[in-house]
């Protein structure tokens, strides 16, 4: 099954050799070119997706989109994209922008109770697992490259490593059955989570050992594990920092099992250059890009007041939709918006804006803002895209991804 969203030479090598592209990139690229860290980008809006593709093209870097069940799912998620719809959107963007760099698509946090709606609907274990299976199958059939199988969450309790491993093996076995029966090529798997209540290294070590043993016992020999997720001290907040000592230990743990460490919650991290230095294989960022888009819109609203002499109202509409959605309360520490200092208010609204960028009222408000500013000689779309592209490019450079796409192809062909 060709991945029509990726026109890169590396993709062709991946398909010819039957090796998942993320695995090919990491194993052979690192062996020949040294350490680098793949950047996983949450597709929280069409602006973020386009900015990421533009950054990848400009820097000749691979780009990996990591879509959670809340964002992209069989019901459309908060972006409005199903897995099939998302990869079709990517294919159109890649074609329009002329992107020739590797584009990797991954499922992020695929498992029971990892979609807000499933918690709100109080699904039992059986229902939650079946919902996860439907999402995994849709991702596979859409052409995803990496599946993060995450069974570390359960309402009302913290599941132990044995329980997490057993459920993880069940979902990987299901995915492999679907893949084989549909004649789909191999994919990479990611296990573990930073959301697990057991954040100690011993539990992570026990989990990966149990998962590998469980797959072996079940005869699931073709499943290609690539990433292990562990707690490296990162939290979505300003002044976020990688705990390099903890990361180095987990890099070794993952390596002992033939895997690469994947970090989550890398948003706003202040020491991104440390990720490839200590050997982190991949790092996910999402809410920060929603925040950057929010701040760009806020800047445009302020510009509109100056050049148009009044409020356009786009930021007000965005804020109203965030408040209507309600998930902003998770980040406000029990306080109301009026109780927050201005910079903290911007942070809470900014990272919560990811839930509403695809809301019809918000999309219409942004179109109106862009139209009115265009009449005054201001390109609103370029302002938003450049803000996002600059930040994404910062991470790509820090992670050692610049020009990686052109350097990796000769290596992969001769390996």
Image: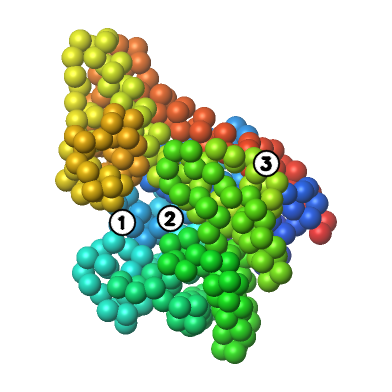
Q: Where is residue 107 shown, x and y percent of the image? A: 46, 61
Question: In the figure, 172 relative to 59: above or below?
Answer: below
**Which residue is located at x 41 percent, y 24 percent?**
383
Q: Which quadrant of the rendered structure holds the C terminus?
A: bottom right
Pick whichever of labels 2 and 1 is earlier in the sequence. Answer: 2
Instruction: Say which quarter of the image contains residue 19.
Output: bottom right
The residue under the point 58% across, 76% down is 206
Q: Residue under circle 2? A: 67
In the image shown, does 202 or 121 lie closer to the viewer? 202
- CB-based contact (under 8 Å), mark 2 and mark 3: no
* Image quadrant containing the N terminus: bottom right
- Res. 13 visible in picture: yes
Which residue lies under the disc numbered 3?
A: 400
Q: Please state which of the two labelled residues, at mark 1 or mark 3, is closer to the viewer.
A: 3
| Observer-nearest of 58 and 118 | 118
Label whose residue precedes the other's in the sequence (2 or 3): 2
Q: Residue at x 63, y 82 (%)?
A: 221
Q: Secondary structure at mark 3?
A: loop
């Amino acid at each position: 099954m060709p991945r029509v969203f990726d026109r890169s030479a590396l993709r062709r090598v991946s398909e010819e050799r039957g090796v998942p592209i993320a695995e090919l990139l990491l194993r052979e690229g690192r062996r020949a070119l040294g350490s680098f860290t793949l950047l996983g980008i949450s597709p929280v809006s069409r602006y973020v997706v386009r900015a990421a593709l533009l950054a990848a093209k400009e820097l000749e870097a691979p780009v990996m989109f990591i879509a959670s069940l809340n964002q992209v799912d069989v019901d459309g998620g908060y972006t409005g994209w199903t897995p099939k719809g998302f990869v079709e959107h990517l294919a159109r963007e890649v074609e329009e922008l002329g992107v020739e760099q590797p584009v990797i698509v991954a499922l992020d946090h695929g498992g029971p109770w990892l979609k807000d709606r499933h918690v709100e609907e109080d699904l039992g274990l059986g229902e939650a697992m079946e919902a996860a299976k439907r999402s995994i199958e849709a991702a596979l059939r859409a052409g995803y490259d990496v599946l993060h199988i995450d069974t570390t969450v359960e309402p009302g309790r913290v599941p132990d490593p044995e329980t997490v491993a057993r459920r993880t093996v069940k979902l990987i076995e299901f995915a492999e059955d679907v893949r084989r029966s549909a004649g789909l090529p191999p994919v990479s798997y990611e296990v573990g989570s930073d959301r697990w209540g057991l954040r100690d290294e011993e539990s992570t070590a026990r989990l990966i050992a149990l998962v590998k043993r469980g797959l072996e016992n079940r005869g699931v020999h073709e499943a290609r594990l690539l990433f292990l997720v562990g707690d490296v001290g990162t939290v979505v907040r300003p002044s976020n920092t990688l705990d390099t000592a903890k990361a180095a230990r987990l890099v070794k743990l993952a390596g002992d099992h033939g895997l690469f460490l994947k970090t989550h919650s890398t948003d706003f991290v202040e020491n991104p250059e440390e990720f490839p230095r200590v050997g982190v294989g991949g790092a996910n960022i999402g809410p920060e890009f929603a925040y950057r888009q929010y701040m760009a819109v806020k800047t445009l609203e302020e510009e509109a007041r100056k050049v148009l002499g009044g409020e356009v109202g786009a930021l007000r509409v965005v804020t109203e939709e965030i408040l209507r959605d309600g998930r902003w309360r998770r980040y406000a520490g029990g306080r109301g918006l009026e109780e927050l200092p201005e910079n903290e208010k911007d942070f809470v609204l900014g990272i919560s804006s990811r839930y509403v960028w695809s809301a019809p009222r918000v999309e219409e408000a942004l179109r109106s803002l862009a139209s009115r500013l265009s009449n005054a000689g201001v390109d609103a779309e370029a302002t938003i895209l450049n803000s996002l592209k600059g930040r994404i490019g910062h991470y790509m450079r820090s992670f050692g991804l610049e020009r990686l796409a052109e350097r990796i192809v000769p290596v992969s062909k001769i390996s």
